[in-house]
Image: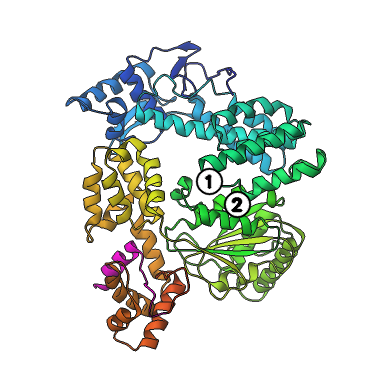
Amino acid sequence: MTRPPVRTAPSGAVYFSLLGPLTARLDGHELPLGPRKQRLVLATLLSRPNTPVPVDVLTDAVWPDDPPRTARKNLQVYVSAARTLLGPAGHEGRDRVVHGCGGYLLRIAEGELDTLRFGSLARAGRAAAGRGDLAGAARLLREALDLWEGPPLNDLRDSAGVAEEAGRLEARCLTVYEDWAETEIELGRPAVAVDGLRDLVERHPLRERLRAAWMNSLHQSGRQAEALAVYDDYRQLMARELGLEPSPAMAALYRSMLGRGREARRPAPAREAVGPAAPPACTAAFTGRPGELRDLLEVLGCGEERVVVVSGPAGAGKSALALRAAHLLADRFPDGRVRVRVRREDGTARNRAEILAELGRLCGVAGNAASPGNTASPEGGAGGDRAATAALADAWQEWQARHRALVVLDDVPDEASVRGLLSRSGKCSVLITARGQLAGLAPVHRVALPALADAEALELLGKLIGAGRLRADPGAALRIVRACGGLPLAVEVSGMRLAVLRHLPLAEYADRLDDPSAALDELVAGDMSVRHRIASGWQDLADGDRWVLGRLAGLAEDGGFTLDRATEALGCGERAAIRAVESLIDAGAVTSPAGEVTAHAALYEVPRLLGRYAHEREGV
C-alpha cells in the first residue's frame, strides 16, 4: 500500500498526485506549486476533478477561521498562477481552470491524476471479479493500491477542508484493500495479505470487514490460534467501546474456524449484484439503527428461509439499512446478494416481466425470454409475452430452490408487485423495503423504521458538517435535526447544504427550518429534494387517504393525536375514524405505538415533514 509506483504520463502532460503529498510532474520533473495557500486551492480543485468547486469551499479550505476581505481577489490570483503553471488542458488547448456560476472547475483527464486512475483500476478489478476472473481482479486491484505513496495530502491536512477530502480518499483505499485481500484469499494466496491487514486493523480496529479478512488470511495460512485470537480481541473491543456483540456474520465465521479443516473454511465467492437504479445518496452515510440492523442480521443470518419487510416513510433510510445488512451477511449467502428496484425512476411500479428479466440477467437464470420492453400489461403483454413471463417466473423459482442467496426487492409499492417473486422453496431469503406495511404478505418478519433518535441524527449531521462545527453550537444543531423530524434523508440534505454554505450559522439555518411555510424549500441540496421524495409517497395514497391525512396533520403539530380528536377532526363516527387512521398506518403515513394499547389510549403521529407537505396540498 505504500510501495512507490512507477509514474507514466504522455509526453508533455502534467501528472498530479494526491495519494501522498500533493505533487505535479511534467515529463518526469516535479513542478513547483507555489506558496502553501496556492497549493491548498489546487488540492481542493483536484479533490473534485472536472466538477465546479464553489468559491466558499475554496475560501474555507484556505482561511478556515477568519478569511480576509480580499479573499476572493486572492483566490483569483492563486487560480491565475495555477493556470500559468499548468498550461492548457488536452490537445485542444482549452483553459485548464475555468470559472462559471458553480465556481472554479479544473479540467483533468484520467491519465493526469492518480485518484482518477485509482478509481478506474478499482472498478475494472471489481468487474473482473464479477466475471470470475479472480487473478485479473487481484492484479488490477493491486495496481490501484500501488498508486498510494502514503496518507493522501499529508502535507496539507492542517486545513479542515483538505483533511475531510483526504479522509474520503483513505476510506476508498480501505475498501479496495479489502477487495484485494479477499480476492487473494480466494485464490489460495492468503500469506501475501496477512501483514498489510494486520497493520490496517491496528489503525482501524472497529472495521469488521478488515478484521474478517485478517482472520481468514491467518486461518488459511495455518495460523488458527492467531485467527481465533483476532476474533476474541474484536469481541472484547466491541463490548468495551460500543456495548455490542460482533455481527452474526462475524460470529458465524468464528464458529466455522473452530471445528473444520483449513480448506473447508475457505470462504465461497459471493456474487453481489446491484440493480441499475442506485440508492439515494443518503445510503452512503449510514448511521444509527443498531437495534433494527441487529434484528435483520439475526433473522436473515439464521439460515432458514425468510421474508423480511422493512417499512417506513419516504426518506427513512430503508434502502440504506437493507444494503448495509446485505453487505454484512456476505458469508451467509454464498450464491450472492442481489438488489432490484421495483419502481421506475418516476415512482411508478415496474411490471413483473421487467423485474423477472432483470433478476434473470443478474443471476444467470436460464430461459430469460421475457424482455423488459414488454410493458403492454402488468403481466408483460398478451399471448406469447405472457407465456415468456410465466416461463421466466418458473425458471426463477427453480433457481431460488437450488441456491442460497439474498434477494433485496427495493421500494416495493404493493403486495401484488412481489408475490410471484418470493421463494416457494429452498434457502433463499428475500428482504423487502416498502413505504407501506404490505399487510397482505404473510408470513413475514417486520422491521418498522421510526424517526432517528436525537443522538443518531446529530451523529449523521456531524459526519457531513464536521464535528467541530457541530460542537460550536449544539443547541442549534439539535433544533435542525428535530425540525427534520429525525428523517435521515432530511438530516442528510441539511448536512449537505450546510457543508456547502459554510458561512451560514447553524442557528440561522435552524430558524429557516422552523418556519412551516419555508422548511421544505430549505431541504434541497443539488438534485436531492426532500419535497420530491415526500411527494412520491403522497402519490401512493388513495384520494380518500390524502384528505384524511390533510385533516390529521394539523392535529399532529403539537405532538400527536388521539382517536377522539381524529373523530372530531374528520367529522365521522368512531368506527369510521378507526378505519381511516388504520388505513394510513397500513400505508406508512401515520405511526402508532410499538406496544399493545387500545385504540382510544393510543397516541398517533404523522411524520413531521409529511405533515408539512399535507398542509401545503390540502390547505389545512
Residue 440 horizontal side relative to residue 23, left or right? right
**x then y, percent, for residue 279:** 49, 52
Q: Nearer the viewer, residue 235 or 257?
A: 235
Q: List the residue tagged with mark 1.
A: 243
Q: Residues within 10 Å of mark 2 (few under 14, many from 20)?
A: many
Verify whether residue 227 appears in magenta.
no
Disc 2 marks a residue whose amino acid type is: Ala
Residue 613 is inside the magenta segment: yes
Q: Looking at the image, which residue is at 67% across and 29% down?
A: 139
User: Toward the viewer: 295 or 58?
Assistant: 295
Residue, disc 2: 326
Q: Secondary structure at mark 1?
A: loop
In terms of image quadrants, where is residue 545?
A: bottom left
> Looking at the rendering, which quadrant does residue 49 occupy?
top left
Residue that lies at the very extreme toward the left in this rendered image? 69
- Label 2 element class: helix
Q: Nearer the viewer, mark 1 or mark 2?
A: 1
Residue 162: where, in percent of width, then height? 38, 28
**Horizontal side of residue 108 vs 79, given as left or right:** right
Residue situated furthest top in the rendering:
29
Q: Nearer the viewer, residue 534 or 475?
A: 475
Left or right, 493 with respect to 212, comes to left
To which quarter of the image does residue 423 belong? bottom right
Q: Please say whether residue 386 is visible from this viewpoint.
A: yes
What's the magenta region? 599-620
What's under tag 1, amino acid-wise? Gly
Quarter in which the C terminus is drawn: bottom left
Q: Is residue 339 above or below residue 566?
A: above
